[in-house]
């Protein structure tokens, strides 16, 4: 169980699984521990974004002649990936988190009077609802229709629950996030603005940001598939939530790009919501994600323990999109280096890498001391710009240009004017490369069916290893293990 990194006292508590759930919820601290356990299933989220979003998109060209790696079918649009381990992980981890959230929500409903403080009781329930919504939103963007399980269901009952329409899944997500934004605190800082033992838990603005993205995602095109887009044109609802974040006074646009991701600058004023990790613990609860990015040769070059394994190079197309004066590239993509007198030209993401913080031994290869930012203030600004471009009544072109140029100025670039949706998505690609947003951005904006086929044709012109992109590949197949556990319960997504 991965626990919140900033809450050291909770690291000493027993995992819930060591007690029966009926006897466990007998003290207020039990509920706090149980909510902390729900956060545990966020641990794999950074890697999931790398495996299913970055690798699926035009940010990585991860095709080999052998075709033996799990990411091969993801990157190359195979229709035979229902048994892929990355696909199965997305389903299993999210539903595990949903089960934990359901358990807490039910126990607060039936036994919550043990928590005498009503503010704490409502906050814990809101945290559980936020996390349940987060897991369902992750699932609906990957798989479309889902079985809705909103209570602690026994395995026998789960086998009777079919997939529900995407609109019904969204209804649950929106209800949970609405409760969360109305019940969570604005922050967990002390009277001097410093971090506390609760810093890292979800906040009111985290719920607003996620709810805004939900409205934007289901406002995207449906592509005539049962995916995350419903074409609902709810940009106004999203914009209102984003405005509340912008005017909340809780966040600041940092002046330098590098400091957003600095190991000594966690919980900075750009962070709206992040996933917390802590290194040096037993069992290991550090961040796995940086180790996924680093090739072994580079780790060896830095005289670090063997930690790498990334054979998914950054796409040449992405590298070429950065202007020579764009300072984000040097903080995002590693340049070629000399190893044993030979130039190694492999490019990889380094945004979450600090070579001075490499684990000391191979046994600690997944123990990086860095949080993963899920949503940051820059994202909020660019999402608001997107809402305006989608609905001109929500703002002016000057506002859109202003947000984009604020970000370009930090990157060392000259301003532009009359920013279009295509240009906005290009700016987002450079700003958030390696952060897992690219695939979702393309799907939400409607650009995926033109950008991806054109990129794949150009990138794979010589090797011809990639399969043709189909709109059905916007979502992933239901894992084969889920299809097999009760034949006929689910119908496989089209195209697989």
Image: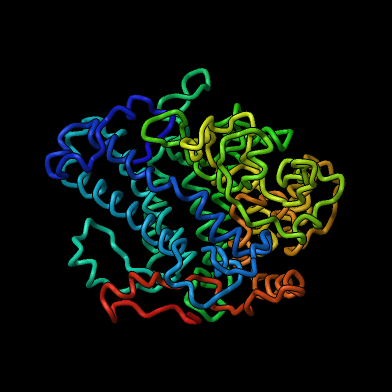
Q: Quadrant of the N terminus?
A: top left
Nearer to the camera, 196 or 88: 88
Residue 182 versus residue 489 in the image, above or below:
above
Q: Is residue 96 left or right of residue 264?
A: left
Nearer to the camera, 435 or 457: 457
* Residue 474 sits in quarter: bottom right
Picture mark count:
0
Where residue 315 sits in the image (x, y, percent)? 72, 59
* Residue 250 sits in quarter: top right
Where residue 121 sits in the image (x, y, percent)? 27, 37
Where residue 94 sits in the image (x, y, percent)? 38, 56
Where residue 354 sits in the image (x, y, percent)? 63, 34
Nearer to the camera, 37 or 380: 37
Task: Identify the residue at image location x=74%, y=54%.
Answer: 427
Instruction: Determine the residue located farthest toward the front in the rendered image.
Output: 340
Task: Identify the residue at image location x=56%, y=54%.
Answer: 50
Display colour scheme: rainbow
Q: Is residue 391 visible?
A: no
Instruction: Determine the residue located farthest toward the top in the rendered image.
Output: 192
Residue 246 versus residue 428 in the image, above or below:
above
Residue 154 versus residue 223 in the image, above or below:
above
Q: Is residue 230 left or right of residue 175?
A: right
Residue 18 versus residue 9 in the image, above or below:
below
Q: Is residue 119 visible?
A: yes
Task: Identify the residue at image location x=80%, y=41%.
Answer: 341
Q: Is residue 69 left or right of residue 59?
A: left
Task: Identify the residue at image location x=64%, y=80%.
Answer: 468
């Amino acid at each position: 169980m991965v626990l919140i990194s900033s809450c050291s006292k909770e690291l000493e508590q027993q995992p819930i699984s060591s007690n029966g759930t009926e006897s466990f919820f007998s003290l207020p601290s039990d509920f706090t521990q149980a909510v902390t356990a729900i956060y545990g299933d966020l641990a794999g989220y950074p890697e999931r974004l790398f495996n299913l979003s970055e690798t699926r998109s035009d940010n990585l060209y991860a095709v080999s002649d052998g075709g033996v790696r799990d990411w091969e079918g993801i990157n190359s649009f195979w229709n035979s990936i229902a048994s892929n381990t990355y696909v199965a992980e997305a389903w299993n981890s999210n539903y595990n988190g949903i089960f934990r959230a359901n358990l807490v929500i039910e126990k607060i409903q039936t036994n919550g009077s043990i928590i005498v403080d009503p503010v704490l009781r409502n906050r814990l329930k809101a945290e559980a609802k936020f996390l349940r919504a987060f897991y369902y939103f992750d699932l609906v963007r990957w798989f479309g229709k889902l079985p809705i399980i909103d209570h602690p269901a026994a395995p026998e009952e789960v086998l009777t629950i079919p997939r529900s329409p995407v609109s019904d899944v969204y209804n649950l997500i929106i209800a949970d996030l609405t409760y969360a934004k109305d019940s969570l605190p604005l922050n967990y800082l002390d009277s001097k603005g410093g971090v506390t033992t609760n810093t890292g838990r979800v906040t009111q603005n985290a719920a607003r940001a996620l709810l805004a993205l939900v409205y934007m995602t289901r406002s995207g095109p449906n592509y005539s598939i049962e995916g995350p887009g419903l074409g609902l044109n709810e940009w106004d609802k999203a914009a209102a939530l984003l405005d509340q974040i912008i005017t909340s006074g809780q966040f600041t646009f940092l002046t330098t790009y590098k400091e957003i991701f600095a190991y000594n600058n966690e919980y900075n004023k750009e962070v709206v919501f992040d996933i917390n990790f802590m290194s040096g613990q037993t069992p290991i609860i550090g961040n796995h994600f940086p180790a996924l990015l680093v090739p072994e040769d580079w780790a060896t070059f830095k005289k670090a323990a063997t930690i790498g394994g990334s054979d998914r190079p950054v796409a040449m197309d992405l590298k070429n999109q950065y202007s020579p004066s764009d300072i984000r590239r040097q903080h995002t993509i590693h340049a070629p280096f000399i190893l044993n007198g030979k130039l190694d030209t492999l490019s990889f993401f380094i945004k979450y890498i600090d070579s001075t913080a490499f684990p000391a031994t191979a046994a600690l290869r997944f123990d990086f001391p860095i949080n993963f930012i899920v949503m940051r203030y820059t994202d909020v600004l660019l999402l608001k710009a997107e809402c305006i471009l989608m609905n001109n009544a929500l703002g002016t072109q000057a506002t859109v240009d202003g947000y984009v140029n604020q970000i370009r100025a930090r990157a060392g670039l000259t301003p532009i004017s009359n920013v279009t949706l295509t240009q906005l998505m290009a700016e987002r690609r450079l700003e958030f490369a390696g952060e897992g947003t690219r695939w979702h951005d393309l799907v939400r904006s409607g650009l995926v069916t033109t950008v991806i086929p054109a990129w794949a044709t150009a990138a794979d012109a010589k090797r011809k290893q990639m399969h043709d992109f189909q709109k059905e590949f916007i979502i992933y197949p239901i894992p084969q293990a889920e299809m097999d556990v009760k034949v006929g319960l689910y119908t496989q997504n089209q195209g697989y």
